[in-house]
Image (cartoon, rainbow, N blue to C red):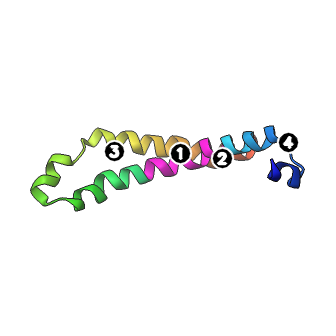
């Protein structure tokens, strides 16, 4: 409440901007970092023979890539019209 009164903003506007930035801006980065974690970080944590057991199927990489492209498009193209 102190931030709202200090800046003189309406709380609904702050929540709306926060939701838009969280949904449009952070979702492509989440898909990217999950992919990096699944395919590069986790296999390095284990010995090679055990890392083969934890390697995810390639369809997860395709899904993460599609999510990155779709939400990246919304982030770059649609964020200016929403704000």
Could you tell me which residue is drawn at 25 percent across and 44 percent down? 56
User: Mark 4 or mark 3, which has the lower sequence index?
Assistant: 4
Q: Quadrant of residue 57?
A: top left
For marks 4 and 2 on the same chain, the one whose residue lies earlier in the sequence: 4
In this rendering, the label closer to the viewer, 4 or 3:
4
Q: Secondary structure at mark 1?
A: helix
Residue in the image at 33% along x and 45% along y:
61
Q: Position of residue 67 (x, y in %)?
A: 46, 41
Q: Which residue is mark 1?
A: 27
Q: x, y (%) of residue 31?
A: 45, 47
- The residue identified by callout 3 is 61
Q: Nearer the viewer, mark 3 or mark 1?
A: 1
The nearer-to-camera label among 4 and 2 is: 4
Q: In this figure, which residue is indicated by the disc labeled 2? A: 21
Q: CA distance from mark 4 to mark 3?
A: 41 Å
Task: State whether residue 52 appears in this view.
Answer: yes
Q: Which residue is mark 4?
A: 10
Which range is magenta? 20-32
The answer to whether residue 24 is magenta is yes
> Disc 3 to disc 2, how far (Cα)?
24 Å
Residue 54 in the image, given as x and y percentages of width and height: 20, 47
Q: Looking at the image, which residue is at 82% across and 52% down? A: 2
Q: Nearer the viewer, residue 44 or 68?
A: 44
């Amino acid at each position: 409440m102190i931030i709202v009164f200090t800046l003189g903003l309406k709380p609904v506007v702050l929540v709306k901007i926060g939701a838009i930035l969280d949904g449009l801006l952070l979702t492509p980065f989440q898909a990217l970092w999950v992919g990096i974690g699944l395919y590069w970080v986790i296999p390095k944590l284990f010995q090679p023979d055990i890392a083969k057991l934890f390697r995810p199927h390639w369809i997860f990489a395709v899904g993460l890539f599609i999510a990155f492209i779709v939400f990246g498009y919304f982030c770059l193209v649609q964020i200016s019209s929403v704000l």
